Amino acid sequence: MTAHPSPDHHPSTRPSGPQTFSGEPFGARLRRAMDERGPLCVGIDPHASLLAEWGLNDDVAGLERFSRTVVEAVADRVAVMKPQSAFFERFGSRGVAVLEKVVREARAAGTLVVMDAKRGDIGSTMAGYAEAYLHKDAPLFSDALTVSPYLGYGSLSPAVALARESGAGLFVLALTSNPEGPEVQHAVRADGRTVGATMLAHLAVENVGEEPLGSFGAVVGATVGDLSSYDLAVNGPLLAPGVGAQGATPADLPKVFGPALRNVVPNVSRGVLRHGPDVGALRASAERFAEEIQAAVAGA
């Protein structure tokens, strides 16, 4: 399907222009998008159960219809969209071809794309992952990429270097909300810091002196609870999954993130996606979440 602008677009939510490659750092572009549109990130998670809820087949045609409908509904009005690569990869090369279209169309509509691929490896393999998502000429070039640092933060060096060169960003898994995460992320190192805190400290170093916002952020779940013992002031964005179907609400964000709230990018996936396939219903749901998040940030 082809995404067409809807006649009921509101001028206040129109994009400032397509997100073409400019070399401007991701952090600066993200700060501007958040200030203009609010910080909401809408996930694109076309898993089998959602395709079924939409009345679509669990095949490449259903994948494409689902994903491009979500782009049509919200890409011209939210700051960030986050496609989950796994749900495209499961269909092989044809699924990846759909993902390429989704990334291209979302960025052309003015939103920033964070590729949720959670890549993590060493040496030339990590460099290959970086080339796939962070090289400006790559078919899957995205504004930012989620990465896993649990082969050691230094293993991310190829991705860090290419992100800087391309004006892209990274979101490093730091304090995730899955129940298995604490056994690694809350483990205490010999220096007394937890592993999660160590990752945050590395990001703070990456972002030193960057204005108005650094390009190297952390993934910090909105459902992880009390974070008062962690220094979230990394001068970079905090991607916060868990709002909506996973149990966190916009009103919870000030309690979880405290003084770092202004740099939080709350991600909502199922909470918006379950309203499809109607474009108007998807759009209305995203706008409700955006308004609630804006109110929470303003009232903090």
Image (tube, helix red, strand yellow):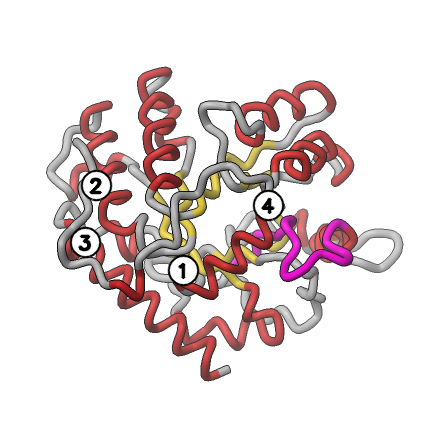
Depth check, mark 2 against mark 3: the one in front is 2
Q: Which residue is mark 3?
A: 275
Q: Considering depth in this image, is 219 or 114 the residue closer to the camera?
A: 114
Q: Secondary structure at mark 2?
A: helix
Of the numbered discs 1 and 4, the one sitting upstream in the chain is 4
Q: Which residue is mark 1?
A: 40
**CB atoms at circles 2 and 3 under 8 Å apart?**
no
Q: Main secondary structure of the magenta part?
A: loop
Query: What kind of residue is marked 3?
Result: His
Residue interval drawn in magenta = 206-221
Q: Which residue is mark 4?
A: 24
**CB atoms at circles 4 and 2 under 8 Å apart?**
no
Measured as percent of width and height from the top left, residue 177 is found at 52, 55
Residue at the (52%, 24%) spot, across then down? 137
Measured as percent of width and height from the top left, residue 198 is found at 76, 53
Query: What kind of residue is marked 4?
Result: Glu
Residue 213 sits inside the magenta stretch: yes
Measured as percent of width and height from the top left, residue 233 is found at 69, 66
Of the numbered discs 1 and 3, the one sitting upstream in the chain is 1
Query: What kind of residue is marked 1?
Result: Leu
The answer to whether 262 is drawn above or below residue 46 in the figure is: below
Q: Is residue 105 left or right of residue 225?
A: left
Q: Quadrant of residue 248?
A: bottom left
The answer to whether 120 is drawn above or below residue 31 in the figure is: above
Measured as percent of width and height from the top left, residue 104 is found at 37, 33
Q: Secondary structure at mark 3?
A: loop
